[in-house]
Amino acid sequence: MASDFVIVYHRQPYEEVEENGKTVFRENASPNGIVPTLKSFFGKAEHGAWIAWKLAEDPSNPGFERVVEIDDAYGKYAVSRLPLTAEQVSSFYHITSKEAFWPILHSFKGKYNYDPVDWPTFREVNWAFAEAAASEASEGARVWVHDYNLWLVPGYLRQMRPDLIISFFHHTPFPAADMFNVLPWRKEIVESLLACDIVGFHIPRYAANFLSVARSLLDVDVLQRQQVDPDLISEGTALTERTVPTLIAYQDRQIAISSSGVGVSVEFIEERAKDPVFRKQAAEVRENMGDSQLILSVGRTDYTKGGIEQLESFERVLQDNSDLRGKVRLMHVSVSANRNMTAYEDIQSGIEETAGRINGRFGTLEWQPIALISRAIPFDDLIKYYLAADIAWITPLADGMNLVCKEYVAARTDNDGVLVLSEFAGAAVELSSAVITNPFSSRSMDLAILQALEMPLEERRTRMTNLRRMVKRFSITAWGTDQEAEFEQARTRRQKG
């Protein structure tokens, strides 16, 4: 059955597990996160389809199940799985996407690695995604493509199916022209994105950067520009913009530029945070802390996340403030982002060495300053630490949005706790009531955590009240509503044009 709504995303929309020798598609355990939100769009479609890849030893094997029909809480939809070999996955995802695109998107030019890129394979995989979407989509269907590893899909799809309404959403930062144009395939990528009806970003800065890139390479006109929502203007922070492009023209086409940050499922998190079981567990964590303050840091092991820089700041604070020794503890969760890349192994080793040095330097038999956790923590377990932590310390060097900080705020139904947040996280433009810090400045980092540790109750409550208002306003539900509106406006423009 042809689908009037098609999602193109590299991840499958379920957990594929084996039970009693049979493959079972298990629905995501938590409604919090991007995948459940994307699936919720199927509820408004007559028939939906999801395009993803699946590892296959032999893609030509006739026994490979390319299309599976799913019937879950979000409705009935088809999942079209593209069989990719381990070599294809390594080339298109681990090498081209992670070694070439990822560092440039996050403005780490020194980490950029062009040499191993196999561009023909990247094209080949993106063409396969586009073919699958074209095959699944009905006449005039909406197709929603997600993230940078599928940059070429819109251009190919437009060639195959000019009738489709195509939207592309970036879940990462998008850099300015002097950084992005390091990529030798820059024009091909941008021309593909300009084949869309909608190109989406988290915040106005990334949208403005995309426009600067497009205008550096092609003749692009700005048709509409508007003032940024006052709630998204955080004075003095790095990522604030005053105006943002909303509609541009290239050749004979109009392309909407969307700025809408992904949020969290506030109701789900609040429900968990109010559960007596989790509140009891949080109270036990607090009891074990005695009169010590708990700082919580949660992120992936990635050079963009600033894990080592954060630990070094903690070391300086303990060195310069002896009264804090034995009175503060850092729970540092750094989950391996990708075990197939040596760059991440080096970061993990650096984090472990730094934490070990700090514990060895300041620790006693009764007190260890850092609890380092390198495995993923189930979300329900995180809730109790969100509730127990005096401070959430989230200081990436670059981050498209960052949802951990929003989860922490959503969980704090008691209106207490302090969020220390990097000004280079996209979330900082929404969460200006956090203690905003510059992770590239030792002085800024150290003063921010000291300010958080010393903050009086009244100020903590005022700041958290403001933060909770923003997290509720820019929730995952609000983001979904924005995307739905963009599709409708694109359809209206298409009918008029």
Image (spheres, rainbow, N blue to C red):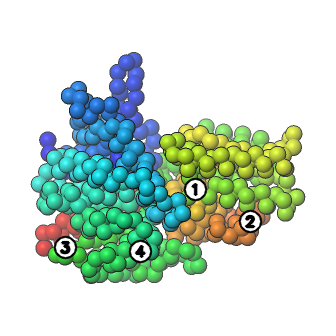
Name the one closer to the observer, 331 or 191. 191
Give the left or right position of residue 142, taking residue 119 as reference. left
Amino acid carrying mark 2 in the image? Asp
Q: Is residue 124 above or below residue 463?
A: above
Which kind of residue does numbered mark 3 sit on?
Arg
Whether the residues at callouts 4 and 1 have beta carbons within 8 Å, the answer is no
Which of discs 4 and 3 lies nearer the camera? The answer is: 4
Q: What whole-number distance in Å separates the C-alpha atoms at marks 2 and 4?
A: 33 Å
- Quadrant of image for the C terminus: bottom left
- According to the picture, the residue beneath numbered tag 1 turns out to be 303
Whether tag 4 and tag 3 are in contact, CB under 8 A, the answer is no
Q: CA distance from mark 3 to mark 1?
A: 39 Å
- The image quarter containing residue 464 is bottom right
Mark 2 sits on what residue?
A: 446
Residue at the image position 58 percent from the left and 63 percent from the top: 397
Q: Secondary structure at mark 3?
A: strand
- Under circle 1, the secondary element is loop
Say whether disc 2 or disc 1 marks the residue closer to the N-terminus: 1
- Image point (68%, 58%), residue name: 310
Q: Which residue is mark 4?
A: 177
The disc placed on residue 253 is 3
Q: Mark 4 or 3 closer to N-term?
A: 4
The answer to whether one can see residue 289 in this image is: yes
